[in-house]
Amino acid sequence: MAGEMVIDVDRLSIVYGEGEATVPVIREASLSIAKGETVALVGESGSGKSTLARGLLKLLPKAGRIVGGKVTIEGVEVSAMTERKLRDIRGSRVGFVFQDPDTYLNPVFSIGRQVADVIALHQKVAPARARELALEQLAKVDIRNPDRVMQAYPHQLSGGMRQRVLIAMATSCHPALLIADEPTTALDVLVQRQVLLTLEHLKKEIGMAILLVTHDLGLVAEYADRVAVMYGGSIIEVQEASHIFRAPRHPYTAGLIAAGLPARGGRFATLAGSPPDPRQLGAGCPFEPRCGRRQPECTEEMPPLVYAGHGLLACWNPLQ
């Protein structure tokens, strides 16, 4: 990893609920992303990927709160900021693209107005200039006939087009970091790759960093520079993509890759067991009940995330 650091997450912990009902959902997660780098955050459903991504700028449900650690973006700690100050960063220095565009596009306003409103808010330009920039931004995300799309409403566009509109909105202010949470899940394979190519093009043009939350290991292998693996609310392995697919160190990572990428003959392996219930996590490694390499210490203490080989690893008995 090289280049100027855009975001540094240092032992971030997030819980839901209070008192006896408190549930730890993110446990001392640490991750850094450099300028111009794409880091893919992977793991099974329920591993904490989306909660971590949204927690970086405190976009959590009312029951969620940060209880430890810190998040630093462009050298400024944001995890302790007030909601008012965070609003200035969201959409300007950090852009968000989420899985379901229908949730984030207002059905009663035209596409042009919605993109222009974001630009006017963060760039402090006149409405006419904001519309000009909105038109340019729609063209940058490879939307054909952007003039027509400016006049359209969300329901008049395809799912892939709506996702491109969200990307246009999220990158309209040239953010330092783009958080893309499952941005291609609802799209067909061809549109998925078109959307990822659009993100790759914008990354190079703007020089932004990307946190790509996804379960699609095929896309990860093609577009990510590094891979961070989550399990049970913890980041357990971080490696360059070229290394992690060839030589995963954590047993869970190896199982995840085997289950997500076909072996010879086109068959997928299975990962036995189910992800843990965060309400029942013990003091040890969360993967211990499913791990064929578990040792006595695996039940007693969570292994720290330390440098090992080509990246970071949290495992008492890693693969060699």
Image (cartoon, rainbow, N blue to C red):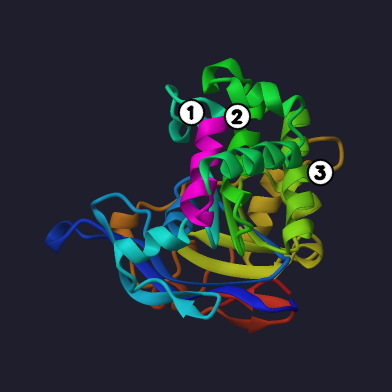
Residue lying at the far top of the rendered structure: 156
Point out which mark residue 246 bears: none
- Dominant SS type (magenta): helix
How far, Cα to Cα, is label 1 from label 3? 36 Å
Q: Which residue is mark 2?
A: 162
7 lies left or right of 278: right
- The amino acid marked with disc number 1 is Asp
Where does residue 213 sit, x and y in percent of width and height? Answer: 58, 51
For label 2, the SS is: helix
Q: Which residue is mark 3?
A: 263
Mark 2 and mark 3 in contact? Answer it, CB < 8 Å: no
Where does residue 177 sit, x and y in percent of width and height? Answer: 60, 62
Q: For the residue carrying disc 2, how many other residues have a C-alpha within 10 Å: few (<14), some (14-19), or many (20+)? A: many
Whichever of labels 2 and 3 marks the residue nearer the N terminus, that label is 2
The quadrant of the picture occupied by the N terminus is bottom right
The span shown in magenta is 112-125
Q: Which residue is mark 1?
A: 102
Whichever of labels 2 and 1 marks the residue nearer the N terminus, that label is 1
Whichever of labels 1 and 3 marks the residue nearer the N terminus, that label is 1
- The amino acid marked with disc number 2 is Arg
Where does residue 102 sit, x and y in percent of width and height? Answer: 48, 28
Instruction: Please tell me which residue lies in front, 106 or 98.
Output: 106
Q: Quadrant of residue 267?
A: top right
Where does residue 150 sit, x and y in percent of width and height? Answer: 62, 27
Task: Please report the residue visible at 46 percent of the width from the left and 62 percent of the height from the top.
Answer: 89
Q: Disc 1 or disc 3, which is closer to the eye?
A: 1
Task: Please report the residue visible at 50 percent of the width from the left and 55 percent of the height from the top.
Answer: 124
Task: Please report the residue visible at 50 percent of the width from the left and 48 percent of the height from the top.
Answer: 120
Q: Quadrant of residue 262?
A: top right
- The amino acid marked with disc number 3 is Ala
Is 271 situated above or below 316?
above
Is 123 situated above or below 283?
above
